[in-house]
Image (cartoon, rainbow, N blue to C red):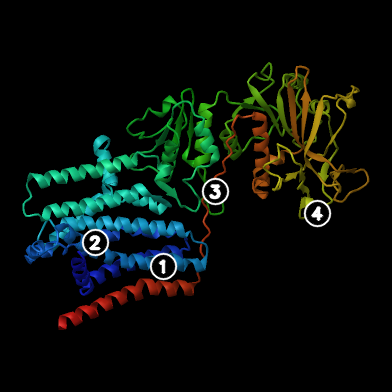
Amino acid sequence: MLAIYKKELKGYLTSMTGYIFMAVLLAVASLYYVANCLIGGYPVFGVVLSSVYFVLLIVVPVLTMRSMAEEKRQKTDQLLLTAPVSIWKIVEGKYLAMFTVFLIPMLVLCLYPLILLQFGSVSLPMAYTSIAGYTLFGAACLAIGLFLSALTESQVIAAVLTFGVLFFLNMSSGIANLIGADGVLGSILSAVCIYQPFVNFVQGIFDLTGVLYYVTIVLLCLFLTVQLLYKKHGTYRAGMSVIACAAVVLVNLIAGNLPSQYLKYDVSEQKLFTTGEQTAEVLKNLDEDITLYLVAQQGSEDTTLLELLERYEGLSSHISVKTIDLVLYPNFLSQYTDENLSENSVLVVGQERSRAVDYYDIYQYSVDYSTYSSTLDSFDGEGQITSAVAYVTADEIPVLYTLEGHDEAALSASLTSSIEKENIEIKSLSLLTNEAVPEDAQMLLIYGPLSDISEDEKNKITNYMDRGGQVIYLRGYTDQETPNLDSILNEYGISLAEGIVLEGDSDHYLPNYPYYLLPDINYSAYTSDVLSRYVLMAFAEGMTETAAGTESGEEEDGSLNYESLLTTSAEAYSKVNLESENLGMEDGDIAGPFDLGVVVTKTLDDGNEAKLIVFSSETLLDEQVDAMVSGGNSTLFMNVLSQLADHESTVSIEAKSMSVTLLTVTAGSAIFWGLLTILIIPLFLLSLGGVIWFQRRKR
């Protein structure tokens, strides 16, 4: 075999064929490399290789067309077949020689990610995983070309045939989608697509099933080539070929049905396909079957999302994953939801309930309103899907009622999504029309009312709390009197200072804005997730602890436990005269410190507890204010809800950032590396090949 290998390799390296192959492959790859990575500053090298896969369809036929066809045309194949070397070793030698020629430009490409390191951060594991995938993809293409070259004596026919077959095998999945093929035909067309396994490598998955797929394709093509070269084909050779094909199909089917966590390793920088401990805990406790439907047309499935769903399937025997095409089954969704779901949304169906997770809740975008362009910010696949699984399997779903009818503020869309992700159902409530707070109310939210509630509404709320109810109250600053709301606070030992709190300590407010407060965060179960972060509140009223009921002449209630969550500094004061232009402390202002967030727990006669959580400004949930502290406000609020909901297992999985830090490449560096990779290296290879070929011709 070594002699055949050396002979074939020498043939490629003493003719222009091998050098043209290497030069074209490097030139085209370098062109995309310069455009995407050096000029565009994109640090993901896999994008380059996924863009140039088509080059192999063109250059592989050039390299493989003469491997067997030329031997047949010159009748030298008979000399090979009668040589004291087995046919297997002849085929192996020829293939390894071609593969060596292919490895030379691949080794050069291995240097490209290292070049990028001088311009910024680059994920080398992702880069070299994609290079490994491209190498395997090319190896399979070479084996197919070798086999097809053995079918004919004409190099031209072999080249055209190789191009046609490779084109079909690369596009078969798209063809299935184009013609609307489903069932067995659609499955076959998708299975023979040799490009599809390469996608996983580009996305940052070192896929052992992909490695197995390409290796078995190579071995199968070499085996079929050997069968073709035997003088006597006969039924035995045909039967062996059929058995080999069946064995390859069977091996890949078995591998494809094994749990993906054992065969696919996530090397992506964002760890998009890695599930955490919370997901493992939720799935371990499953005792009912769950179906995860990916709502997408055949051939248009989001590969990242599909791969993540398969991870869920591998983690629990109770989970199955299916793809549903609404073109074929237009009425399917109406059984579970009346939402209009986007393409590649996920429907999680349990025994008693279901939840739809829209594509745009999984892929979260931000919009730049100055340019009206959107940017992908984060991927919340694990958080949304795990939350949905916990929701459909929960025994009871806590309900958060939001009071309405008093010009209350509205929860933002992002906060609503976060609450639903926490598996808390949101319902609106008007106590003007309802006789009482519903029995299923786990919590009641009073969010920034600008007018007072009525005496009757106050009684309904206090009756609810006397049953062990939990109320969250965010004050809305208003010039109207709110005696009924204030009386609830007084009953729970909370006194409000007149005016708005301003800070005198510069470490506790935003520069030049002493009414934008950065309070101290006190340790509590309610604040555990924000102890190392900031909370920002504006136009807040000061709260202090007072003996319950003292303002109304009642005796002190010893059943109350007052817990401060957010506290100003000692230099804070409440500005009473809001028309004053002097922001400093004046006569008549009330000296601090004050509480800006409190939890009061009341022990009832039956041993149950009622809770009142008060934040002294509705701006706690204002999106712009929240953004100024990187989501610290919303994190605090969600932590409060989680404590009150009292889930057996809380799902709190943060979205994974998809933002990319672009490389900083100077114009001079881009020009230098562009000239080197696109022109100098390919021209050097062509010149070297030309010189060697010319000297060989002179001999």
Asked if 151 appears above or below 353 in the picture, the reply is below
Disc 4 + disc 2, Cβ < 8 Å: no
Q: Nearer the viewer, mark 4 or mark 2?
A: 2
Q: Which residue is mark 3?
A: 366
Q: Amino acid at mark 3?
A: Ser
Q: Amino acid at mark 2?
A: Val
Disc 3 + disc 4, Cβ < 8 Å: no
Q: Which residue is mark 1?
A: 111
Q: Which residue is mark 4?
A: 506
Q: Position of residue 467 (x, y in %)?
A: 72, 19
Q: Nearer the viewer, mark 1 or mark 3?
A: 1
Q: Which residue is mark 2?
A: 60
Is disc 3 placed on a helix, strand or loop?
Answer: strand
Disc 3 + disc 2, Cβ < 8 Å: no
Is disc 2 placed on a helix, strand or loop?
Answer: helix
For marks 1 and 3, the one nearer the N-term is 1
Q: Residue furthest front?
A: 84
Q: Callout 1: few (<14), some (14-19), or many (20+) C-alpha neighbours within 10 Å?
A: few
Q: Nearer the viewer, mark 3 or mark 4?
A: 4
- Left or right relative to 621: residue 203: left
Quarter holding the N terminus?
bottom left
Quarter holding the C terminus?
bottom left
> Visible in this render: residue 177?
no
> Visible in this render: residue 503?
yes
Asked if 29 appears above or below 498 in the picture, the reply is below
For marks 3 and 4, the one nearer the N-term is 3
Q: CA distance from mark 4 to mark 1?
A: 52 Å
Q: CA distance from mark 3 to mark 2?
A: 43 Å
Q: CA distance from mark 2 to mark 1?
A: 23 Å
Task: Please name the residue shown 58% across and 40% down the image.
Answer: 414
